[in-house]
């Protein structure tokens, strides 16, 4: 195996299970640019027990779980800027599309 291929294979093995990576802090960034937080007890977690951070921030602000149809929009378009002042909640995708 060539050196570059070996390096690529080694990196893939490290990231297949993020929790085993030595720098894992409970957060990962997905391919879409969203930060995912490990939350095994969340009612709307994904199959890897993760929830998008912007949804958790909005839930904390509101004091309740978001409904699955509710959409949290990033006002500045930066998907990892999850400050509450940068987030806007819509009741569904239809309302979100009307606003954009």
Image (spheres, rainbow, N blue to C red):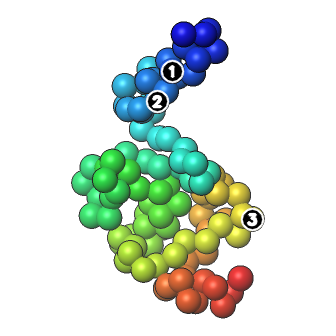
Mark 1 → mark 3, Cα distance in angstroms: 36 Å
Query: Is 16 situated above or below 53?
Result: above
**Vertical comparison of 68 with 4: above or below:** below
At horizontal 27% and vertical 49% (from top left) the residue drawn is 40
Q: Quadrant where the C terminus lies?
A: bottom right
Q: Residue furthest front?
A: 1
Q: Which structural element holds mark 3? A: loop
Q: Can you tell which of label 1 and label 3 is closer to the viewer?
A: 1
As drawn, is 3 to the left or to the right of 10?
right
Any part of residue 97 in sight: yes
Which mark lies nearer to you, 2 or 3?
2
Which type of secondary structure does the marked residue at label 2 adopt?
A: helix
> Which residue appears at 46% of the width and 79% of the height?
70
Which residue bears the numbered disc 2?
15
The answer to whether the residue labelled 2 contacts the one labelled 3, judged by CB atoms less than 8 Å apart, is no
Q: Earlier in the sequence, mark 1 or mark 3?
A: 1
Residue 30 x %, y %: 53, 47
> Which residue, given by chain and number where applicable, does mark 3 sit on?
76
Residue at image point 42% right, 38% down:
26
Q: Position of residue 39 (x, y in %)?
A: 33, 50
- Residue ID for mark 1: 9
- Image coords of residue 76 (percent x, y): 74, 65
Which of pointers 1 and 2 indicates the residue nearer the eye?
Answer: 1
Residue 59 rendering spot, x and y as whole percentages: 43, 67
How many dots with numbers? 3
| For marks 1 and 2 on the same chain, the one whose residue lies earlier in the sequence | 1
């Amino acid at each position: 195996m060539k050196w570059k291929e070996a390096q690529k294979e080694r990196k893939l093995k490290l990231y297949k299970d993020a929790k085993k990576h030595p720098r894992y802090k409970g957060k990962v960034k997905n391919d879409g640019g969203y930060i995912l937080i490990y939350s095994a007890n969340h009612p709307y977690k994904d199959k890897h027990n993760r929830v998008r951070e912007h949804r958790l921030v909005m839930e904390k602000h509101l004091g309740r779980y978001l409904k699955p149809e509710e959409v949290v929009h990033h006002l500045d378009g930066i998907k990892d800027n999850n400050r509450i002042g940068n987030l806007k909640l819509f009741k569904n995708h239809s309302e979100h599309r009307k606003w954009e």
